[in-house]
Amino acid sequence: MRLSFAKNMTVIHLPYIVTLTRLASRDLDDDNLRFALKYIRDELSELLMPEYQKSYVNKKGRLQAIKGRGDADSRITWRYGQERASMTAVRIEIESSSELLPENIDDAHI
């Protein structure tokens, strides 16, 4: 996901609306849909909000990332969907909702 993100991402200003759509042969109920997409949400939030990245040294002396901190930021609205498809995949759509902000507010000062 990181490689695709780096290759395809353009500048989008805060706040974000992120839609995660699961493509699969069968549907999940709402709570299982969110659980199935949790890893992707955590990883994506790390890419969108790098200032939340934290890590620690584990018992083996290796640096270990702490995931899932950036997805709690109120400037990201998360939406979920699912569609029937012959292959299993996740479609990620990221759009700016900055047009909802007053014109005199800079996204860096939100």
Image (cartoon, grey):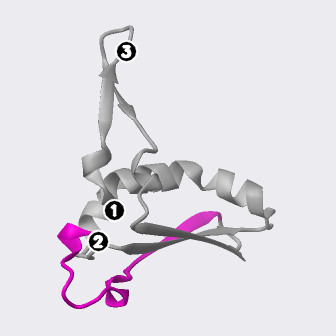
Q: Is residue 2 above or below residue 17?
A: above
The secondary structure type at the circle numbered 2 is helix
Q: Name the residue under label 3.
A: 58
Q: What crowding class fits label 3: few (fewer than 14 Cα within 10 Å), some (14-19), or many (20 or more)?
A: few
Separation of residues labelled 1 and 3 (CA atoms) = 29 Å
The secondary structure type at the circle numbered 1 is helix
Residue 56 placed where, x, y %? 32, 23
Residue found at x 79% / y 62%:
28
Disc 2 and disc 1 in contact, CB within 8 angstroms? yes
Q: In this view, does 2 lie above or below 14?
A: above
> Would you identify the image quadrant in which residue 100 lies?
bottom left
The secondary structure type at the circle numbered 3 is loop
Tell me the quarter of the image containing the C terminus.
bottom left
The label on residue 4 is: 1
Residue found at x 39% / y 67%:
75
Q: Is residue 31 above or below residue 98?
A: above
The magenta segment is 88-110
